[in-house]
Image (tube, rainbow, N blue to C red):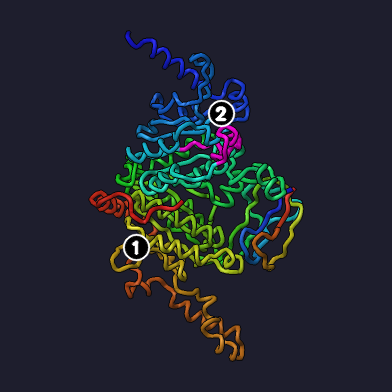
């Protein structure tokens, strides 16, 4: 019992830390529909798995060497388990100085990230705070201003992006470095109603631009999960955000040195859904429901979509095939006709980099009419965003399977896989396959304008040429020249991809894994 | 009052509702032909159609109001 007094003091100090910002502030926080940072961590983590680091950090006040007051660090972090796997988890305590970064004491945030890098485990950031300059009160505290920057967060953030899964949730008004901590991640989720993300909040906007804007209108879920793409997903509440974080992590390995985790399934590897035979309409202008199609191919209940409301012409989802995690890219003809626009390209780029970083094989379900055309698309820089997505395709080295569902047109259509001689992507097409540099309908006028204009009846002459070319449009003619390797019964898609995924995992598991060297930008 | 806008440019191919119709969230309001695909524009919410702002065959820019709901 030699050290009992110190143990008593330790427990007393922990109690003070658990008080967070005090009863009044905590109650206000809860009344705003938010969980406290400690409740967030224990709710998300497996029961009794949280091992806190730095609980004693805080600002103490002494009188005659007697501790009379203690304001805990407003960053709570440590190790925990999610679904039995270790993670490095941390969150801002909004009840202490609004979660402002300079209230964290020491460099707890960087410590959390360094711990994850060393242990090669995912980083979970529950962000509910502002920047280091979140409060100008700091200037009074230290008696000077300071030049922003220096080592710290960015030192580890870049390493983390290429080494371990990084997930972030925007769970309050998040500004400055807080917003950056949400954005520089592999997966981010914003809580509808209570989460907002911005470079600076309404008072700063008012002072700088002379306009008043409500925080929700400035950086709520509508702005960032449905418009800007800053946040991948939106959550209906905090519990939904946790559910999504868990789902996301369940497909990923703990680090880029490991293989994604296999999960056994009761779904049949040879399942051939009849619906697939009729899911693509014969009428070329009729869209199909891509999410339904995907679900006929993947394991039951294994669908997890990322960025549903941003870059909508491209669907990106994580899923499992015969228990093995895969990254699926698909074109959605319901949005922008399925064409590749600037947001869609940005989404595709990040998703391919994510898959490549964490050794997830990629399946591309192609129904691609080409890059988006028109004035707005050009203004949005579609070709620049598009070539960046193409570069990602040619940089990535994970196994790749292409299923041509229907259209593959132009430069964007060509980008359905890496065509280098050094690669062998597995490729099949459905009988609905329809491809070319330019669609026949528009291409006829471009190629035969002079003849058509000189004809007695230009319209019927144009139709005549179109009809003639359409006779050559059958994908079987393409297959004759081995330009498409195989045309398959759509119902065989799942069984064929099951065979492929087993090959893909065998190859990956005998390859040298780890960071790819290209880094990964958010 | 909700404005239903064209989310991408295209030609109004079909108008699926009339003024006064009660519509449900995700119901097809307009079919816009874009990139040679008949893309449905869905109602973002439940409501009653108070105005149809476009005509069949009309080209619309991204952001054009197609219909209004009460």
Q: Within 10 angstroms of label 2, few (less than 14), some, or many (20 or more) residues?
A: many
Residue behind mark 1: A427
Splitting the image into 4 quarters, where does residue A265 fall? top left
Count of labels in the image: 2
Please tell me whether mark 2 sits on a helix, a strand or a loop: loop
> In which chain is the residue bearing label 2?
A
In which quadrant is the N terminus of chain A drawn?
top left
**Residue A517 image offset from top left, x and y in percent:** 34, 55
**Image position of A261 with respect to A69: above or below:** below
2 or 1: tag closer to the N-terminus: 2
What is the number of the mark on residue A222?
none
The residue located at (61%, 69%) in the rendering is A375
In this rendering, which labeled residue sits more in front, label 2 or label 1?
2
**What is the span of residues highlighted in magenta in the rendered image?**
A125-145
* Residue A132 falls inside the magenta stretch: yes
Q: Nearer the viewer, residue A481 or A241?
A: A241
């Amino acid at each position: 019992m030699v050290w009992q007094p110190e143990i008593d003091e330790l427990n007393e100090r922990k109690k003070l830390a658990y008080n967070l910002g005090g009863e009044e502030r905590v109650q206000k926080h809860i009344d705003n529909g938010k969980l406290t940072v400690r409740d967030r961590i224990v709710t998300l983590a497996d029961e009794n798995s949280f091992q806190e680091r730095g609980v004693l950090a805080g600002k103490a006040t002494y009188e005659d060497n007697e501790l009379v007051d203690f304001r805990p660090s407003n960053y709570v972090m440590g190790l925990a388990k999610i679904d039995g796997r270790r993670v490095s988890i941390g969150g801002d305590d909004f009840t202490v100085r609004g979660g402002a970064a300079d209230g964290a004491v020491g460099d707890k945030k960087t410590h959390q990230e360094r711990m994850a890098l060393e242990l090669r485990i995912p980083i979970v950031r529950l962000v509910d705070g502002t920047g280091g300059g979140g409060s100008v009160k700091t200037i009074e505290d230290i008696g000077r201003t300071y030049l922003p920057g220096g080592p710290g967060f960015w030192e580890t953030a870049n390493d983390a992006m290429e080494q371990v899964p990084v997930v972030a949730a925007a769970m309050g008004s998040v500004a400055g470095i807080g917003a950056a901590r949400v954005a520089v991640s592999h997966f981010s989720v914003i809580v509808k109603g209570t989460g907002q993300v911005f470079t600076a909040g309404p008072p700063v906007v008012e002072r700088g631009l002379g306009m008043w804007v409500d925080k929700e209108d400035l950086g709520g879920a509508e702005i960032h999960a449905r418009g800007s793409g800053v946040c991948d997903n939106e959550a209906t509440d905090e519990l939904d955000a946790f559910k999504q974080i868990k789902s996301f992590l369940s497909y990923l390995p703990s680090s880029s040195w490991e293989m994604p985790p296999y999960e056994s399934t009761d779904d049949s590897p040879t399942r051939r859904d009849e619906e697939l035979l009729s899911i693509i309409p014969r009428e070329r202008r009729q869209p199909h429901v891509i999410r339904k199609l995907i679900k006929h191919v993947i394991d039951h209940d294994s669908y997890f979509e990322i960025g549903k409301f941003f870059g909508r012409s491209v669907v990106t989802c994580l899923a499992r095939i015969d228990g093995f995690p895969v990254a699926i890219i698909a074109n959605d003809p319901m949005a922008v006709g399925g064409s590749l626009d600037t947001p869609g390209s940005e989404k595709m780029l990040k998703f391919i980099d994510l898959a490549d970083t964490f050794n997830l094989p990629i399946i591309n379900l192609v129904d691609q009419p080409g890059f988006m055309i028109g004035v707005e698309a050009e203004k949005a820089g579609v070709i620049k965003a598009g070539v960046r997505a193409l570069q990602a395709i040619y940089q990535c080295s994970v196994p790749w399977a292409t299923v041509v569902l229907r259209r593959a047109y132009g430069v964007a259509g060509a980008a359905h896989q890496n065509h280098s001689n050094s690669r062998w992507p597995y490729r099949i097409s459905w009988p609905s396959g329809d491809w070319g540099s330019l669609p026949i309908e528009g291409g006829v006028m471009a190629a035969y304008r002079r003849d058509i204009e000189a004809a007695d009846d230009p319209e019927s002459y144009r139709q005549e040429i179109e009809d003639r070319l359409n006779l050559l449009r059958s994908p079987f003619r393409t297959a004759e020249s081995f330009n498409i390797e195989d045309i398959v019964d759509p119902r065989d898609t799942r069984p064929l991809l099951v065979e492929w995924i087993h090959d893909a995992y065998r190859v990956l598991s005998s390859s040298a894994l780890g960071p790819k060297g290209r880094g990964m930008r958010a | 009052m909700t404005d239903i806008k064209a989310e991408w440019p295209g030609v109004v191919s079909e108008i699926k509702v009339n003024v006064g119709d009660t519509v449900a969230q995700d119901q097809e309001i307009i079919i816009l032909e874009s990139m040679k695909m008949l893309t449905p524009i869905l109602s973002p919410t439940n409501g009653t159609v108070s105005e149809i702002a476009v005509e069949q065959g009309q080209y619309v820019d991204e952001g054009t109001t197609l219909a209004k709901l009460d």
